[in-house]
Amino acid sequence: EGLHAAKQASAALYDSSLESLSKMSQNDLMNIFEGAKLSEISPEPGMSAFSLAMKINCFKTDRDAQRIITAGGFYINHSKVTNSSEVITPGIHILPNNMTLVRVGKKTYHIVKWLM
């Protein structure tokens, strides 16, 4: 069981495919990305990457958000997002397990649990 958990953690951290993240529970993600902030939110039609970032408190100001996103310091499910108006899409940004992993910079993680 420990080996399986270690392999799962490695896949979540280093495999950029969505498959490994899609198979994880909220508890798995919280254990692997220790210190990540958990936010539970409802999806809104047309929600942008910028709106998501602000809603889960990734940035202190709108200006910081725009600057860091366009500079390439914002990731959703291991994919760099540089367009702050990119629309959050189920299957790409919202995984089948209704979770999303957001990273700001090198090691600040946020886990989003979508209330469907």
Image: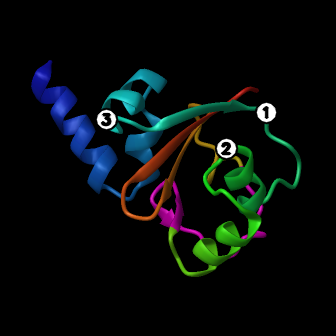
Query: Residue visible at 33% across and 45% down?
Result: 12
Image side of residue 30 versus residue 15, left or right? right
Query: Residue visible at 78% across and 55% down?
Result: 51
Residue 82 in picture, x, y percent from top left = 62, 76
Sooner in the amino-acid sequence: mark 1 or mark 2: 1
Q: Amino acid at mark 2?
A: Ile
Question: Label 3's element?
Answer: helix
Q: Is residue 82 visible?
A: no
Q: Nearer the viewer, mark 2 or mark 3?
A: 2
Q: Nearer the viewer, mark 1 or mark 2?
A: 2
Q: Is residue 36 above or below residue 4?
A: below
Quarter the C terminus occupies: top right
Magenta portion: prevailing SS class: loop
Image side of residue 85 versus residue 72, left or right? right
Q: Residues within 10 Å of mark 2 (few under 14, many from 20)?
A: some
Which residue position is annotated with label 2?
A: 56
Q: CA distance from mark 2 to mark 3?
A: 19 Å
